[in-house]
Every structure is written in C-alpha cells, then in structure tokens.
C-alpha cells in the first residue's frame, strides 16, 4: 500500500511536469535548464574559495550587464537613505550584487555540504531563541527576508538537524524548479508553493512545525497592507500576521549574515516578536505587520550591502500616488 501511494504521487509529479513543459515549450525550458545546470555544476566543481570568487565575478558582470536592475537599486537606496552620499550608495549597490554572486557560489556547493563540514561555513548566533520557540509546541513562523545568503540559511539549518518548511514561488521553468528543489530538500526541508499555500501552512503550524516566510517583498493590494519601510509606505504581505493571529504560532526573526572579517556566515535568531491581539482583526494585522517590517528594516540597516536592493520594493503605491519606477 505504501509503495503504491509513493508511485501514485510520483506519477502525478511526472504528469504535472510534462504538462508544464508542453505549456511553456520544451526546447526553451531545456535550454534554460541546461544553462542553469552548467553554471551550478561548473561553479560547484571549484574549491569553495574559488567558487565564491566565481560567483562574485558573475554578480559583478550582472551589475554591468543588467542596468535596469542596478537602476532599481539606485532608486531604492535614494528612497531609503536620502541623506546618504552617492559614493556610499554606489558601494552598497555593488555590494548587493556581490552578495548575490556569493550566494550563487554557496548554492553550487550544496551537494558537498554535510554535518562534518557545515560548522566551517555557517555558525549559529542565538540558537537558544530558536530552540525555546520550537519547544513551546505552538508552531514557529520564521520571519526572514532576502538578506545575506538566504538560500543557505534554511539549508544549513536542516544539516544541523532542524528541517523545516518554507514558502517559495515556483520557478516558471519546471525543469529549473525541479533542479532547485533537489538542492534545497536534500536534508529534509520542504518547499510549499506560495500559491494556494494556506491549508498546508496551517496544517504544519498546528502540528508544531516551522515555516519560513520571506516577508520583505512588494505585495499586491489584495495580499498586503501598507506600513512604513525606511520611512516610505510599502505594501507588505499580511500573511505572517494573519497566520500568527489564527494559529498562535511564535513569530521568530531569523536570518543569515556574511561576516567578512571571519569569512563565515552567521545564522542569527533574534528573540520572538510578541503578537498583538486585541480582537480587532483588521487593526491587529496592520499593527503586527508594521512590527515585523520594522524588525526586517533594522536588520537591513545593520547590513545594507547584503539586501536585495534590485527588487522593486515600493512598486505597489497607495491610491493616487505615481509609479516610483
């Protein structure tokens, strides 16, 4: 019976993959997959120090070859740090691209990471906060963002024995998505498709599990609420607050930061953020979302060159305001 269920699930996955390939175009998907596979395997074949350097070279090339992304970063930095000089904004902007390249280097070496070598790459800071939150049995929402090497954070955490679920937007190319998932899930992590994820997330949290949510991206008006982010109204996902209020789960900030002095990543867990629950659902969602956003902003201010400034964070505007980008 068990093997029959496994086979049935695999058949469903295979059928879904074939359908997605037909809809998107097999040749296009194969070319994109081949390029992604070649980059990952090529960089991953290098010793770690060279893999990181290769990734940063690719990041630097992207900075030059994708000017629209660089322009998005410049607009964002002007909004977030209006008092900052151009030279400092340029340093942060280039650092953000280097950070993405460093992450590529680390991801490429996921197949080589294990319990024997992870401590030389990622070290904990504040793990007691995580363990205490998990021990409450209420479920944990790991509040995080596109900071540092965010893909490495959950992967390293699983190698240390703390597998978890996380929300992720599926890559349009199903072959690339399958490749990415094979890297992420090697030590028991599970990605939940961001679309139609509510039921699965509720089930996980009510069972006392951990769900990681990247809560620092622009949201649509239908999915988010406006709150200050670097002093500028930003439409932010209301999902974290809604889930916390509905389940009573602990909201715990967690993020991975590159320590350039010690040449190591530090996986940091801050104390949990208390959930405001007055009984007024609408106001409580807004108030809690503002608190979560402020926590993420504080982290970014400490490490501005390790955030995803190329993202159009302020794309959704309050009614009547012009498009920033």
Image: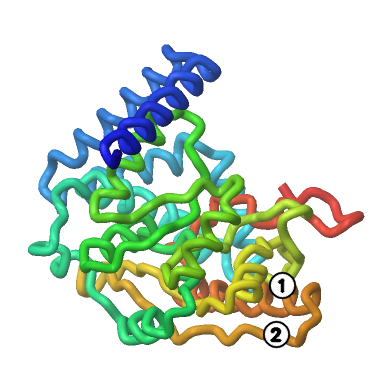
| 314 in relation to 245, above or below | above
Q: Position of residue 43 (x, y in %)?
A: 21, 39
Q: Position of residue 210 (x, y in %)?
A: 42, 68
Q: Residue furthest top?
A: 27
Q: Residue furthest left?
A: 116
Residue sitting at x 33%, y 55%: 189
Q: Position of residue 51 (x, y in %)?
A: 19, 46
276 relative position to 5: left or right: right
| 31 in relation to 201, above or below | above
Residue sitting at x 37%, y 86%: 132
Residue 55: quadrant of the picture: top left
Residue 161: quadrant of the picture: bottom left
C-alpha separation, residue under disc 1 versus residue under disc 2:
20 Å
Q: Tell how many labels.
A: 2
Which of the numbered marks, if any, corresponds to residue 137? Answer: none
| 246 in relation to 311, above or below | below
Residue 198: quadrant of the picture: bottom right
Chosen colour scheme = rainbow
Of tags 1 and 2, which is closer to the observer? Answer: 2
Note whether residue 77 is visible.
Answer: yes
234 relative position to 296: left or right: right
The residue singled out by tag 2 in the image is 277
> Quick one: SS at disc 2?
loop
Which of the numbered marks, if any, corresponds to residue 228? Answer: 1
Residue sitting at x 32%, y 72%: 267
Residue sitting at x 72%, y 60%: 224
Mark 2 surroundings: few (<14), some (14-19) or many (≥20) residues within 10 A = some
314 relative position to 105: left or right: right
Q: Of residues 91 and 129, which is closer to you in this image?
A: 129
Q: Position of residue 72 (x, y in %)?
A: 61, 49
Note whether residue 82 is visible.
Answer: no
């Amino acid at each position: 019976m068990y093997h029959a269920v496994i086979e049935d699930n695999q058949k469903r996955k295979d059928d879904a993959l074939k359908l997605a390939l037909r809809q998107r175009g097999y040749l296009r998907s194969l070319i994109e997959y081949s390029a992604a596979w070649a980059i990952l395997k090529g960089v991953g074949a290098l010793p770690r120090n060279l893999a990181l350097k290769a990734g940063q070279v690719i990041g630097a090339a992207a900075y030059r070859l994708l000017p629209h992304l660089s322009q998005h970063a410049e607009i964002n930095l002007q909004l977030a740090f209006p008092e900052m000089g151009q030279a400092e904004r340029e340093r942060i902007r280039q650092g953000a691209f280097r950070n993405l390249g460093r992450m590529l280097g680390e991801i490429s070496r996921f197949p080589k990471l294990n319990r024997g070598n992870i401590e030389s790459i990622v070290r904990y800071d504040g793990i007691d906060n995580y363990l205490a939150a998990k021990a409450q049995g209420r479920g944990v929402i790991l509040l995080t963002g596109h900071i540092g090497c965010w893909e490495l954070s959950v992967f390293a955490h699983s190698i240390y024995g703390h597998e978890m679920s996380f929300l992720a937007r599926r890559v349009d190319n199903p072959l690339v998505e399958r490749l990415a998932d094979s890297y992420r899930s090697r030590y028991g992590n599970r990605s939940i498709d961001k679309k139609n994820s509510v039921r699965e997330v509720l089930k996980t949290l009510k069972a006392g599990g951990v769900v990681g949510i990247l809560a620092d991206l622009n949201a649509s008006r239908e999915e988010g609420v406006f709150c200050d982010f670097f002093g500028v109204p930003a439409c932010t996902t209301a999902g974290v607050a809604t889930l916390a209020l509905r389940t009573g789960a602990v909201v715990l900030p967690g993020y991975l930061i590159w320590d350039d002095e010690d040449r190591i990543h530090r996986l940091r867990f801050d104390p949990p953020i208390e959930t405001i629950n007055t009984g007024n659902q609408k106001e409580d969602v807004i108030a809690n979302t503002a608190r979560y956003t402020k926590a993420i902003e504080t982290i970014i201010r400490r490490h501005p060159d390790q955030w995803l400034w190329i993202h159009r964070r302020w794309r959704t505007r309050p009614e009547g305001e012009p498009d920033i980008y």
